[in-house]
Image (tube, rainbow, N blue to C red):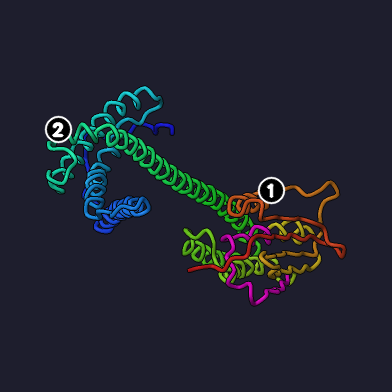
Amino acid sequence: MSPLPATPEDTLEIPPPARHAGLLAFGFWTLLALSYALSGGLSSISEGNDPDWTRALVWNAANFYPWMALVPLVGWLGRRSAGPGWNRFLALHIPAGLAIALAQTLLHLVVFWYACGPGRMPVATLAAFVRMQFAYTYHLALLTYWVMLVVLRGLESRRHLRDERLRNARLETQLAQSQLQALRMQLQPHFLFNTLNAISALALAEPLRARLMIARLSDFLRMTLDQRHAQQVPLAREMEFLRCYLDIQQVRFQDRLSTRLDLAEDTLRAAVPSMILQPLVENALRHGLLATAQPGCLHIASRRDGDLLHLCVDDDGLGLPPDGPLEGVGLGNTRARLQVLFGAAASLRLSGRREGGTRVELRFPFREHVA
């Protein structure tokens, strides 16, 4: 057993135990006394003697009940001796163990002497009885002290380990939430800048369309502010964000943009990272459809694949550049958020379509959103 780090207790403070804890302790020590009394009585029967059940019960009760009262003291001494080395531990517990075992032994023998009556003892005086029983009883008391100390320190170590794991889990959760919030704060200005840039391009040439985009942008920002603290939302709610964003783009692209949604019914309650689809759609529009004068189609699909949710964004634009895709803020942000939330269980795949255009696929664990 390795001593635990020192704690700041400077005085013996034994808080009043909860009622159920006190009853549990009393039941444990009583059961221990009864089991030893029964064992001693059965041993007498096996040897052909008539057992004295009262004396056996009194002997064991006088032995174990004092230890029940000494448990808080032994636990406190264990905490006081905790430190990085064994010197402090042994310097405290060797004398403490000798003293406490001596006190318990004397109390045990005195209580038994007076409870059972001097006339029933094999010797005439208490002093003679103590001398006769002292070696065996004191040795047992010392052994009991060290067993109790080891058990109590083991329980304390387990409690500290459990608390440390809980504290680390909370810190990891807080770190992940902070990372997600930072990524989200990075995404929103990026989206806002691109949208305002498009509005400014229309402001002089087509002011009516510019004002309509501003109105749609206001609706979109209001929805994102309503969910600003939510890291995950139901897919149905995410699609409301996306439709609002697509309304903005529809004003911008007019007849050049058509969208098709293919969402499986059993996926609408799935928990998805908030605004996970918007940067993928924006990426498809900017790098696929905006660069060509031809009308384009955007296809968004969802389906459940066992324990995974599969989301797909297709466009029929220019496709990937010959030297491979360049991962900008939108895709990099999406990949980082999936990594923080799901680790290796999530994936983002960007590929070209045989019929032309680009496909982005997301896979991550399927979980129903809990409001």
Is the Cβ of the residue at disc 1 closer than 8 Å to that at disc 2? no
Question: Which SS class for mark 2?
Answer: helix
- Residue 103 shown left or right of residue 221 in the figure: left
Question: Which SS class for mark 1?
Answer: loop
Q: Residues within 10 Å of mark 1 (few under 14, many from 20)?
A: few
Residue 7, image x, y percentages: 32, 34
Q: Which residue carries the number 1 mark?
A: 328
Residue 285, image x, y percentages: 72, 61
Task: Examine the rendered structure and indicate whether residue 110 appears above or below residue 309.
Answer: above
Q: Amino acid at mark 2?
A: Ala
Q: Residue at x 71, y 74 (%)?
A: 262
Residue 293 in which image quadrant: bottom right
Residue 179, image x, y percentages: 54, 47
Which quadrant would the N terminus be assigned to in this image? top left
Question: Quick check: can you spot residue 136?
Answer: yes
Mark in front: 1 vs 2: 2
Q: Residues within 10 Å of mark 2 (few under 14, many from 20)?
A: few
Q: First in sequence, mark 1 or 2: give its number.
A: 2
Which residues are drawn in magenta? 257-282
Mark seen at residue 127: 2
Q: Residue at x 66, y 62 (%)?
A: 205
Farthest-out residue, bottom: 265
Q: In whole angstroms, how far apart are the C-alphas of marks 1 and 2?
A: 91 Å
